[in-house]
Image: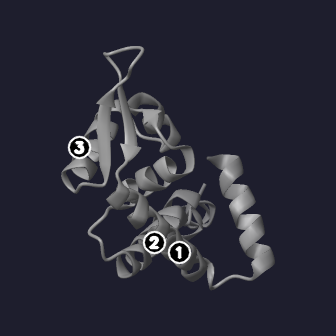
Amino acid sequence: MTTDQEDEIYQLDEQVGFLLRLASQRHAVIFQNHIKENLTGTQFSTLMRLAEHGRVTQNHLGRLASMDIATTKGVVDRLRVKGLVKSEPDKTDKRRSVISLTDKGSALSTKLKHHGKDITAETLSPISAREQDILIGMLKKIS
């Protein structure tokens, strides 16, 4: 195989990982432009999961937000310092912690839901509504 043929076979600009990273970087910039509360995307996701599910164990919260144990603990600790979540021992198993939103966290999560919709709309704005539905479906399929 010649070098020209190899170059045709592998074009970085056509690789899914590279394109996903570019899309993710663009989305991260849009996210930071909308979210002025000094939150990371992971912290945002954690607050949204707590708003959706209410009180959950820290372990379950990690699964809901697709975080490993160490990341979950760090995110919960940072959100607790910000006064957005609280942690209490599980009544049935004192080894486990139950995480929930504080009043401040609940109010912020309500506000952030609107930002989330705007962020998604801006991220997907280059493509049609039909393409957006297809993209979301495909991403769900490969995630």
Please tell me how crowded label 3 is: few (under 14), some (14-19), or many (20+) other residues with Cα within 10 Å. Answer: some
Instruction: Establish if 119 lies above or below 100.
Output: below
Q: Residue furthest right?
A: 130
For disc 1, the marked residue is 114
**6 lies left or right of 139:** left
Cα separation, mark 3 vs mark 2, equals 22 Å
- Can you give x and y, in whole percent of width and height, for residue 87 in the image? 30, 36
- Between residue 84 and residue 2, name the one nearer to us: 84
The tag earlier along the polypeptide, 3 or 1, is: 3
Residues marked 1 and 2 touching at CB (< 8 Å): yes
- Percent from the top left, x then y, of residue 67? 41, 40
Above-or-below relation of 12 to 17: below
Using the image, tell me which numbered label, if any, was put on residue 111: 2
Q: Distance between the residues labelled 1 and 2?
A: 6 Å
The answer to which of 87 and 39 lies nearer the viewer is 87
What x and y, as percent, mark residue 44? 40, 59
Q: In this view, does 101 lie to the left or right of 78?
A: right
